[in-house]
Amino acid sequence: MRKTLVLPAVSVVGGLIGLAVRRVQLRTAFEPGTGLPISGAPATYGMWAVVILTAVALVILCRGKHRTFEACYTSAFRATGMVQLSALMAGAILMAVAGFLNMEYFLSAPVDFFTGRRTVSMVRVVLGVACLAAAVGIWLTAQRMRSGYQVRSVWVLMPGLAGCLWVMGNYQAWAQDPVMGGYVFFLLAVLSTIAAGYLLPAFAFGKGRVTASLVVCLLGPALCIMSLGDGRPLCDVSLLLATAFYLLAMGSALMTNDAKSVVPEGPAACGGGCESCPGCGPLPVNPTPEEPEV
């Protein structure tokens, strides 16, 4: 079978298996009264086994010879199929929903009687704004790539920024939780968003790493699906789903474009305006409409 089908399947199936094991772990591997972990619980070992096996399988399948996408973000991530475009748009929509839900989560949080402050960090509001910016960025970047233009814009950094703020928004709750096992997989899912925010924009500046990007884009959704079993607030659930759809779409597009011949048979993915594509000439990053002839 083609890797473009096998790899996303491994990611989704591994995530679903991890989701089922995670639910069992939360029911059987922690003491009901205190929430402390039970030493030697089989479900805990099973959960780590699923995560490690999924990661190892993805690393092995993603290795190999890849194309060099030098300073051409468009030729690397341009979606070519309806499924990829649908997943990308689903990620953008869910990202926007997550933005509003994070703001609502802060505004609806109770106020502490002694400090007069809300029990939820103000970072949630900033995260909501970043999620809205990320949603706009995903949509604008997809439109620019469909038009065949180069992508060198601050918009491609917004999902990674949202991931950084996501960590900050949850740090207050994590710091008060003495049991790391209750949120460790959710933390790994958030860190995958940050890693993708670093690796994917690098393709626009000639620093892209195909193998590492594929692993992050496929392991991230698996971790996000597993983390759905944690019983997170709705704002986090929507952001987990948004991240899963976005990374799967980007990873699938990268796999599809990487599998193509180095010398394209038809027009280049970037519209014939990228220096890294054979026969292409320079194309303005921000093209302007053609001026009428005098």
Image: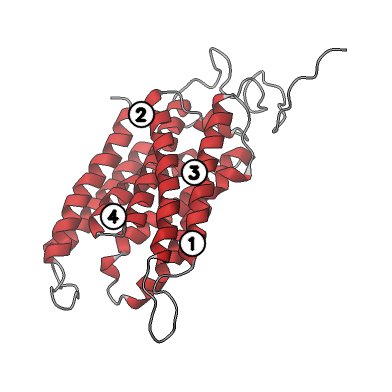
> How many dots with numbers?
4
User: Which label sits on residue 227?
Assistant: 4
The crowding category of the residue bearing disc 1, from other C-alpha atoms within 10 Å (few below 14, some 14 to 19, many at least 20), is many
> Is tag 4's residue or tag 3's residue first in the polypeptide sequence?
3
- Secondary structure of residue under mark 4: helix
> Is tag 2's residue or tag 1's residue first in the polypeptide sequence?
2
Pick the front one: 214 or 121: 121
Cβ atoms at labels 2 and 1 below 8 Å apart: no
The crowding category of the residue bearing disc 3, from other C-alpha atoms within 10 Å (few below 14, some 14 to 19, many at least 20), is many
User: Which label sits on residue 125?
Assistant: 1
In the picture of the structure, the residue carrying the numbered disc 3 is 135
Task: Check disc 3 and give the amino acid type.
Answer: Ala
In space, the residues marked 4 and 3 are separated at their CA atoms by 21 Å
In the picture of the structure, the residue carrying the numbered disc 2 is 4
Pick the front one: 67 or 89: 89
Task: Check disc 1 and give the amino acid type.
Answer: Val
